Amino acid sequence: MVWCHPPHTYHLDVEYGAVAPAGVEAVISAESLDLRWFPVEEIPELSDEATRRLVRRTREVLRSG
């Protein structure tokens, strides 16, 4: 759970590791301000440790499978 301010509430982020096919377009909903696919090597510096950990685990699963 993450404390958000504002609106001074908790929310739960659920993240998934995924492999996007080449050329796929991201479709954004009204809930988000921005959405993009990034190659693993180009994940923005502003990403948090949880996101980087998810990427590492996803790569490990893909390599072992």
Image (tube, helix red, strand yellow):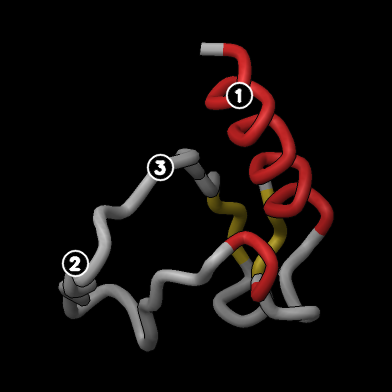
Residue 22 screen position, x and y as percent: 26, 63
Residue 45 screen position, x and y as percent: 79, 79
Q: Quadrant of residue 31?
A: bottom left
Q: Which amino acid type is marked by label 2?
A: Val
Residue 40 screen position, x and y as percent: 62, 60
Residue depicted at x 51% and y 12%: 65
- Residue 47 falls left or right of residue 59: right
Of helix, strand and loop, which one carries label 1? helix
Q: Which amino acid type is marked by label 3?
A: Ala
* Of pointers 3 and 2, the one earlier in the residue sequence: 3
* Of pointers 1 and 2, the one earlier in the residue sequence: 2
Cα distance between the residues tagged 1 and 3: 13 Å
Give me the disc on residue 63: 1
Cα distance between the residues tagged 3 and 2: 12 Å
Nearest the eye: 8 or 32: 32
* Of pointers 1 and 3, the one earlier in the residue sequence: 3
Most extreme residue toward the bottom, as rendered?
A: 33
Give me the disc on residue 48: none
Residue under pointer 2: 24
Q: What is the crowding at mark 3: few (fewer than 14 residues within 10 Å), some, or many (at least 20)?
A: few
- Residue 3 falls left or right of residue 18: right
Q: Which mark is in front, 1 or 3?
A: 1
Nearest the eye: 28 or 36: 36
- Residue 15 falls left or right of residue 64: left
Of helix, strand and loop, which one carries label 2? loop
Q: What is the crowding at mark 2: few (fewer than 14 residues within 10 Å), some, or many (at least 20)?
A: few
Give me the disc on residue 18: 3
Q: Which mark is in front, 1 or 2?
A: 1
